[in-house]
Image (tube, grey):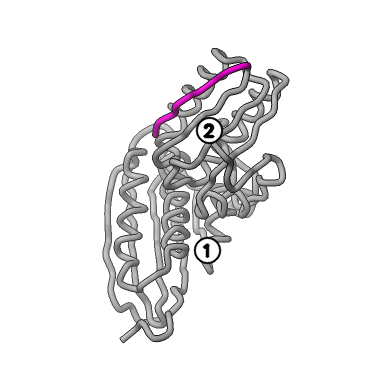
Amino acid sequence: MQVKAESADRRLRLRLSGELDHHAARQLMKSIANELEYALPLEVVLDFSGVTFMDSSGIAVALHTLQQVKQLGGKMRIVNPSAQVKKVFFATGIQRMIEMEDADEK
Amino acid sequence: MKSENQVVLEFPSRSSNEAFARVAAAGFAMQLDPTLEELGDIKTAVSEAVTNAIVHGYPEDFGRIVMKLRIREGNILEIVVKDWGVGIADVEQARKPMFTTGNDERSGMGFTIMESFMDTLRVRSAPQKGTTVTMRKRISTRLGERK
């Protein structure tokens, strides 16, 4: 699991790639926390286009990240989830708590 | 129900085996000619069951996990994940959405996902004896493609 961060003007895009399971979640949460601390973003985009598999560990990561972003007074959305990733979010109803877009221009 | 084919896998409760278990289950399921969506469902459900055994079955140490994959009459895939760990005192409570005894790395959604991605889910557990999760899913037969 990898995270690549791009930030400008307190906007942060986190490109996740690989398989997001419990094995990957702890390190991923640390990496995301570091990026948030560094960029202090008001707008966060979690880009899932490189995520090839996700289980409920991804929900914990998304909710945990959302909580941190809110504490910074910012907003967060998820973009480019695969069909499998979307199905996990929808099965648990979490999509009602997190803004999600099928695709974005970037 | 007659069993037509089966494999039994045993591995230690190391988190690196989560990926191994779901890929192995998907590989075994291939003989039922599943759709991509069905394969994704199987991988996700296995990932949840095996992660539960690793995180909650053996919270303090490493232990043994056995996964049985079976094909049953009627194009049904059966997956059994068994551990000999601490067990669950209240299975009904554990199956509720958002319930977790884990830390904030866990969402409490594992059983909810297993239930919605598979057709049936049975959980048998006894404190200090272990937990057995049995899941079944009928794989759709695609018209014109099966011999």
Please say if A31 is above or below B133. Answer: above
Q: How many marks?
A: 2
Looking at the magenta stretch, what is its main secondary structure?
A: strand
Q: Amino acid at mark 1?
A: Leu
Identify the residue at horizontal 53%, vertical 46% (top origin). A81
The magenta stretch spans residue B43: no
Please say if B4 is above or below A88. Answer: below
Task: Please determine if labels 2 and 1 lie on a single subunit.
Answer: yes
Q: Mark 1: few, some, or many residues within 10 Å (few <14, many ≥20)?
A: some
Chain letter, disc 2 residue: B
Identify the residue at horizontal 40%, vertical 63% (top origin). B79
Name the residue at the top extreme.
Answer: A38
Chain letter, disc 1 residue: B
**C-beta proximity under 8 Å, tags 2 and 1:** no
The magenta stretch is A1-9
User: What x and y, as percent, mark residue A15?
Assistant: 48, 32
Q: Which mark is residue B105?
A: 2
User: What x and y, as percent, mark residue B147?
Assistant: 30, 86
Displayed quadrant of residue B70: bottom left
Find numbered disc 1 in the image and state the secondary structure of the residue it sits on. Answer: strand
User: What x and y, as percent, mark residue A90?
Assistant: 63, 52
Displayed quadrant of residue A103: top right
Q: Amino acid at mark 2?
A: Glu
Q: Which residue is mark 1?
A: B121
